[in-house]
Image (spheres, rainbow, N blue to C red):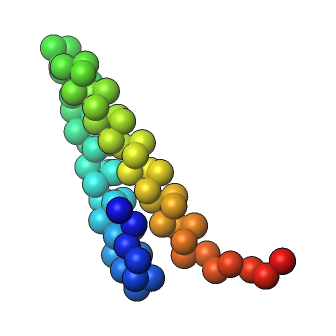
Amino acid sequence: MLPVDPAEIPRKLAELRLEHRDLDTAIAQLQIDIAADELAVKRLKKRKLQLKDMITRLESALIPDEPA
C-alpha cells in the first residue's frame, strides 16, 4: 500500500492526514448521537488507527538512513 516513489510520499501523507482528520469529525458526530451505531464507531476508530500507522510508516520513510 505504500508508494514506492519517494516523491509520492509527501502527497500520500497529506492524503492520509486529511482522511484521518475527516474520521475525527465523523466519529465525534456519531458519538454525539445517543442512538449511534456502536459498531460503526468502532469501525471508524479502527480505520483511524490504521491510517495513523500508515502515516507513521511514511514519515519514517522520509527520514534518511544514517550509516552505523
Instruction: Please tell me which residue is depicted at 25% across the width and 19% down the height of the picture.
Output: 38
Q: Quadrant of the C terminus?
A: bottom right
**Number of numbered labels in the structure image:** 0
Q: Estimate the x, y position of residue 1 in percent, counting from the top left.
A: 35, 62
Task: Answer whether residue 3 is visible to the viewer in this image.
Answer: yes
- The image position of residue 45, as x and y in percent, is 35, 34
- x and y, in percent, of residue 34 in the image: 20, 14
58 relative to 8, above or below: above
Residue found at the very far right of the displayed protein: 68
Up-down relation of residue 27 to residue 38 (above or below): below
Please say if 29 is above or below 5: above
**Is 51 left or right of 65, judged from the image as shown?**
left
Tell me residue 39's x, y (percent): 24, 21
Q: In this view, does 18 lie to the left or right of 40?
A: right
Q: Which residue is drawn at 21% across and 32% down?
A: 29
In front here: 5 or 47? 5
Task: State whether residue 33 is above or below residue 15.
Answer: above
Q: In which quarter of the image is residue 55?
A: bottom left
19 on left or right of 8: left
Q: Residue furthest top?
A: 35
Q: Which corner quadrant of the image does residue 42 belong to? A: top left
Is there any visible trace of residue 10 in the rendered image? no
Farthest left residue in view: 35
Residue at horizontal 28 percent and vertical 54 percent from the top:
19
